[in-house]
Amino acid sequence: MEAVILLGAPGSGKGTVAEDLKASVRFEHVSTGDKLRDAVKAGSAVGLEAKAYMERGELVPDEVIIKIMDEVLRTGSPDARYMFDGFPRTVHQAEMLDRSLAGYGSKVSHVFLLDVPREVLVRRICGRRICRQCGAVYNIHTKQPKVAGVCDQCGSTDIYQRPDDNEETLNNRLDVFEQQTASLIAYYDQTGVLVRVPAEDRLETEEKILEYFKQS
Ligand code: AMP
């Protein structure tokens, strides 16, 4: 089992970068945000617990997240390589992850910190639109579907804005991110696995991360 982490503010491009890199590197992309949104949609116990926190832009309690991640590791293949996106968000989660991975004889090999200025994040996130059917991501400023209102990938017209992608919730999410990440960055800096990646340009970001995969 191998594990790398994409660490970055909401809108830093973690999800897109992870999906793009799949074309070149074999790994499983695990996004806790996606898992939570699926749970909310399904109305499961986890979803019911997480919903209100997510709507306020606050972090879902660690116990809920740890339950989700334990399940991922337990049911995955022993030789899986994971790319975690949006996890861990707190030092407590990072410690729990280290402990779980150690149980499988593994550890975090790289933590890529995607670095994007705040004003760029606000523009990206408030303009973000998503296809509810297939999850394709668009942006009203930079990436409109070819036919207005119709998803390029699946043809659905159900393209929506995530309820937590409004400016007020976003500012809260960015504040939460900055507070929490300061200690996470210190945590991973200590173990020498942190790699800072300037991430305004998506292709350059992906090339940089790929270099590390080629080296390892
Ligand atoms: P994301 O899609 O990663 O921006 O996550 C959306 C929301 O899900 C966040 O604002 C949090 O409320 C919640 N969330 C996702 N991942 C975590 C995590 N690792 N720990 C706590 N809350 C999380």
Image (tube, rainbow, N blue to C red):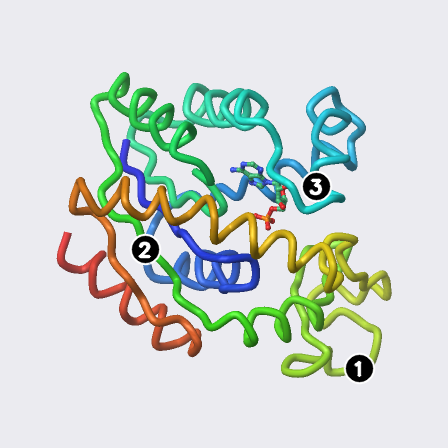
- From the viewer's perspective, is residue 71 above or below residue 54? above
Query: Is disc 3's CB within 8 Å of ligand 1?
Result: yes
Give the mark nearest the N terminus, 2 or 3.
3
Marks 2, 3: nearer the viewer = 3
The residue wearing badge 3 is 54
Horizontal relation, residue 140 to residue 30: left or right: right
**Residue type indicated by callout 2:** Phe
Residue at (43, 38) in percent of width and height: 88
Residue 82 x, y percent position in the rendering: 37, 40
Secondary structure beneath label 2:
strand
The residue wearing badge 2 is 112
Give the mark nearest the N terminus, 1 or 3.
3
Horizontal relation, residue 126 to residue 202: left or right: right
Residue at (72, 62) in percent of width and height: 130
**Residue type indicated by callout 3:** Met
The residue wearing badge 1 is 147
